Amino acid sequence: MTRWKFSREFKIEAVRLVTDRGVAVAQAARDLDVAESVLRRWMRELTATPVTAFPGNGQMQADLAEIAAPKIR
């Protein structure tokens, strides 16, 4: 089974389809061919942390990156 990868822009536009245009989550998920639970998770992530939502491949969220960064003395 192939894992799908969606760009940050796609995820933001998918959320806007529901929040700004008033399309039902179930209908938007069907139209975009994603699971309803995935679309709801994208909505939660974007609402909770709009700036750091959907960091992308290999990028850590800001708070995790700070913890993992090497300390320079």
Image (cartoon, rainbow, N blue to C red):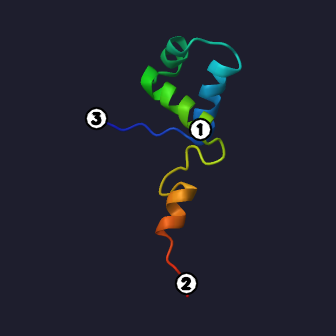
Judging by the rendered image, the residue that carries numbered circle 3 is: 1
The amino acid type of the residue labelled 2 equals Ile
| In the image, residue 16 above or below residue 66 | above
- On the image, the x and y values in percent for residue 59 come to 52, 57
Mark on residue 48?
1
Question: Looking at the image, which is closer to me, 2 or 55?
Answer: 55
In the rendered view, does 51 fall on the left or right side of 73?
A: right
* SS under mark 1: helix
Mark toward the start of the polypeptide (2 vs 3): 3
| Residue located beneath label 2 in the image | 72
What x and y, as percent, mark residue 70? Answer: 49, 77
Neighbor class of circle 2 (other Cα within 10 Å; few <14, some 14-19, many 20+) is few
Counting the numbered discs, the total is: 3
Q: In terms of depth relative to the viewer, which is nearer, 50 or 7?
A: 50
Inspect this view and state whether residue 35 appears.
no
Q: Return the residue found at the far right.
A: 20
| Residue 37 shows in the view | yes
